[in-house]
Structures are given as C-alpha cells and as structure tokens.
Image (spheres, rainbow, N blue to C red):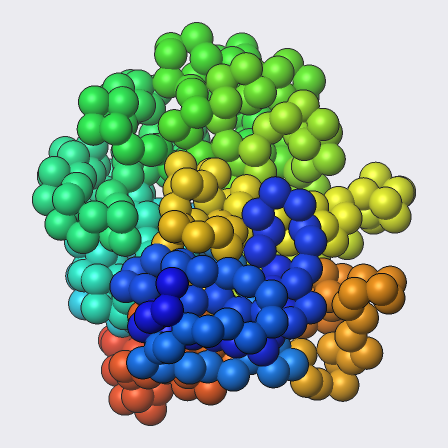
C-alpha cells in the first residue's frame, strides 16, 4: 500500500496478536476505520496525518468488560455491599432520569477515552441515553440495560430491554451494540434469565449479569433453591457462551465445570471485589479450565476510577497474594485479559483486541518517556515493556486514543469535548440527583 489516512510511525509495537512479540521500531497505517498495514522500520506510505510515536508503545485499545455509567462517585463509601445497594444504589437508581444517565455516561466515556479504553460494556439504566452518548463520543460500546425485578422500579424490565435491542440493533453497527442485561439472581426472577437468554439467541446478541459476588448471596441462594446460581441457570437452560458474568467470586468446582462446559465468559473486577470486601475470584483456576476471563473496573461507585492500567496491576497482584504464588497471573496473561480476552468476552475478537491488518483501528499510544516507565528494553535485552504497562503505567500515560480509525484523544486532550463544560454539566446534574434521591449516606 502507498496511501493511508493515518500513519503512526517510529513507535514500539505490541500487537497482542498470537504471540506477545514486540516490534522495537515500527509503524501502523490506518485506512478508513481499519488497520491497513503494520511493519518494521520506516514505510513508504503517504498519509493525510502522520503521528510520530517516538518513545511510545503502540498497542490495541483496552477493553473494559464490566462497568456501569454511574455518576455519584465518592459520596457513598465504606459500606457493606448489601447496605450499600439498599441504602444508596437503589434509592439513587430509582430516582434516575435519562438526563442523569446522559451526564454520567459522558463523564465515564471521557474518562475511559483519556485512559486508553476504546471498548466497554455497560449495564445500567436508560440504555438509550448511554447509546446516544456513545454514538457521539465515538467510543465502542456494548450496552446492556439492567433489569431489576425486585424492588420494582429500580431498574429496567424485560420489555424495555427488548425495545432497546430492537431500536439499536443495526443503528450504529459494530460500534454501539445492544445486549440483554439481568442484574443478579437475588434481584431478578429465574424466568427473567430464561426469557433474556432465549431473546439473546433470537437476536444474536449477548447477555450480561452479575453472579456469585458475595458469600451471603450464595448462602441465601442455596437456602432458597438448594443449589448455586450456576446450577440453577444450567437447569433452566439459561447459561451459554452468550453470557458474560461479572465477579464469579464464590464458585466451587461444580460451578466452574458448568462455566467451562457452557462457554460462559467472566469479567474479573479486582478493585471492586477488594473495596466491597467481596472476596477473591479464583481466576487462575478458571484459566486452567479454559474459561475466558476479561478485566473490568465495575462502576466508579465501587472502584472509584475506570483506569484499566490500575486494574491490570491490582488484578495481577491480588491473584499472587490470594494464591501465595508470585507466578500467578503474569503480566503477559493480564495484558491479554485487558485486550484480546476482553474482546472475546464481548464476541468481538475478530474485530478488536489486537493489532492485525484488516481489524478495526482501535489503537492507543502510551507515552513511555517518563521516569516511572524507564529504562525500556527491547530487542536483545531482557524485555520489560509489558511489565511496565502492567505494573508501572496508569491511565495518565495515554497520549493518543483512536477508535474506528478516528483520533478521539490527541496529546492527552479530548478532541471533541471541552472538559470544563463537561464538568459544569456533571456537577449540576449530580447535585440535583442527590437532592432528589436522598440516599442514606450516614
Ligand atoms: Zn457491577
């Protein structure tokens, strides 16, 4: 090829395509929304825009496999999970309007883009508002409404979910994708799981949920139904490779057998699990069984940021601590979880998650020219680039974010948004919501 729209050159390329080999100095060319060429050295390609990636790593955008477009960051801290849900989340959720969600979605998507996340899955309220925001910001989004049967009115319903899927399937194809979403077995009926799973098959989309987050929830399930939620979902025929379940902290061997046999995917949320004292998901055992695991931040209420670099670092360290084995969840494994394995969780691995000619151009540049990311060794030296990205880097190190071939963050600035305007909008909307919802923050 000789012509491209964007040429990124002179950078260290980490493709995450097959092996984790690194090209110490190379280029990536973009034509339209796809990667047109990847190679070593200086290419003979003319492009409308040339980005010099000196001292930068060029890598696939990060994939966040579990989050909620929430807004009330930092006002409801240090509570037990069930108290937190009942005293804070549910009153806020019940008071939400589409406008609140629009503001939360704008703030969350701005934070994600600035931090190198190019794809996320959301499960929350007013999915249409989140989808409209994603359509404008340019980020890649999978959006699952959050159905809650009990208490009524705290979430979406099967009917609103189905309407949302009908409205959005095909509206922004491949970039804003609707799914089905069921909050959790303790807040939803089994029939809702079955209906959504059947509808997901009929519409050829996925289904997102929370499973086995806390010990008390599992105890309650066992007392009520005589089995684990995995056994119950298996019994009613509502678990398959279409399902992506967040957490899966309290699971036994039988549960993991069901997960592996069904092809169900898992979103590992280490920060949220630590902050809410939920426990440690047996991720290394899941990986040994061949279960696909992605990485998620969960919402800014339980994390409190959506920094996927931090999530990689915390996720790897938590597994080492829990297993007593410093070899557990290596940097190489966790960086794949944040990219290609995350793409698999969303059924998008043929389009995103690695740098390969023909795939979508979802690319980030991480600026390594900083003391905490130095020295850098490539080619002939003991390789340390992946270790730097996992154990030393943060969202603040992202210089450029490209989604679908469009530069959305340039020199650490959002291209299409003025953050000061966004802050004022979010501030006012959040204060109004708080005064309406009156959560029990004391
Ligand atoms: Zn969640």
Q: Residue at x 38, y 28 (%)?
A: 242
Q: Residue at x 46, y 73 (%)?
A: 44
Q: Residue at x 50, y 22 (%)?
A: 263
State which quadrant residue 396 falls in: bottom right
For the residue pair 276 and 87, the one nearer the viewer reads as: 276
**282 displayed left or right of 179:** right
Q: Position of residue 367 (x, y in %)?
A: 61, 79
**9 displayed left or right of 408:** right
For the residue pair 362 and 66, the one nearer the viewer reads as: 362
**260 displayed left or right of 198:** right
> Can see residue 92?
no
Q: Position of residue 343 (x, y in %)?
A: 46, 44
Number of on-image labels: 0
Q: Is residue 246 above or below residue 321?
A: above
Where does the N terminus fall, quadrant-wise?
A: bottom left
Q: Residue at x 80, y 70 (%)?
A: 377
> Can see residue 385?
yes
Q: Position of residue 57 (x, y in %)?
A: 61, 71
Q: Position of residue 187 (x, y in %)?
A: 37, 34
Q: Is residue 104 above or below residue 125?
A: below
For the residue pair 147 and 174, the one nearer the viewer reads as: 174
């Amino acid at each position: 090829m000789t012509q491209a729209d964007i040429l990124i050159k002179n950078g260290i390329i980490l493709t995450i395509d097959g092996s984790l080999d690194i090209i110490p100095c190379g280029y990536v060319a973009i034509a339209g929304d796809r990667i047109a060429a990847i190679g070593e050295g200086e290419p003979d390609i003319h492009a409308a825009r040339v980005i010099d990636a000196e001292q930068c790593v060029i890598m696939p955008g990060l994939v966040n496999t579990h989050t909620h477009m929430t807004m009330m960051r930092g006002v409801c801290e240090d509570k037990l999970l069930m108290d937190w849900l009942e005293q804070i989340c549910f009153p806020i959720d019940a008071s939400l309007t589409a406008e609140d969600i629009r503001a939360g979605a704008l703030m969350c998507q701005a934070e994600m883009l600035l931090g190198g996340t190019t794809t996320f899955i959301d499960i929350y309220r007013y999915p249409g508002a989140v989808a409209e925001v994603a359509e404008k910001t340019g980020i890649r989004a999978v959006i699952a409404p959050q159905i809650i049967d009990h208490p009524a009115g705290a979430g979406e319903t099967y009917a609103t979910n189905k309407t949302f899927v009908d409205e959005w399937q095909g509206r922004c194809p491949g970039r804003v994708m609707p799914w089905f979403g069921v909050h959790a077995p303790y807040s939803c009926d089994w029939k809702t799981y079955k209906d959504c799973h059947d509808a997901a098959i009929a519409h050829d989309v996925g289904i997102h949920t929370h499973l086995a987050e806390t010990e008390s929830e599992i105890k309650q399930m066992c007392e009520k139904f005589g089995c684990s939620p995995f056994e119950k979902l298996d019994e009613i025929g509502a678990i398959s490779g279409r399902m992506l379940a967040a957490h899966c902290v309290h699971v036994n061997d039988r549960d993991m057998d069901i997960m592996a046999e069904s092809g169900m995917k898992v979103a590992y949320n280490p920060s949220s699990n630590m902050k809410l004292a939920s426990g440690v998901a047996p991720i290394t055992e899941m990986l040994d069984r061949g279960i696909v695991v992605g990485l998620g931040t969960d919402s800014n209420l339980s994390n409190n940021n959506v920094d996927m670099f931090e999530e990689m670092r915390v996720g790897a360290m938590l597994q080492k601590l829990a297993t007593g084995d410093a070899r557990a969840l290596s940097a190489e494994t966790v960086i794949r979880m944040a990219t290609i394995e995350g793409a698999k969780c969303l059924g998008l691995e043929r389009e995103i998650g690695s740098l390969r000619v023909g795939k979508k151009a979802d690319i980030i540049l991480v600026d390594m020219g900083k003391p905490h990311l130095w020295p850098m060794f490539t080619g002939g030296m003991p390789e340390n680039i992946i270790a730097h990205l996992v154990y030393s880097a943060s969202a603040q190190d992202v210089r450029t974010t490209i989604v679908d071939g469009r530069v959305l963050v340039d020199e650490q600035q959002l291209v299409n948004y003025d953050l000061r305007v966004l802050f004022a909008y979010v501030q006012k909307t959040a204060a109004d919501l708080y005064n309406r919802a009156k959560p029990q923050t004391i």
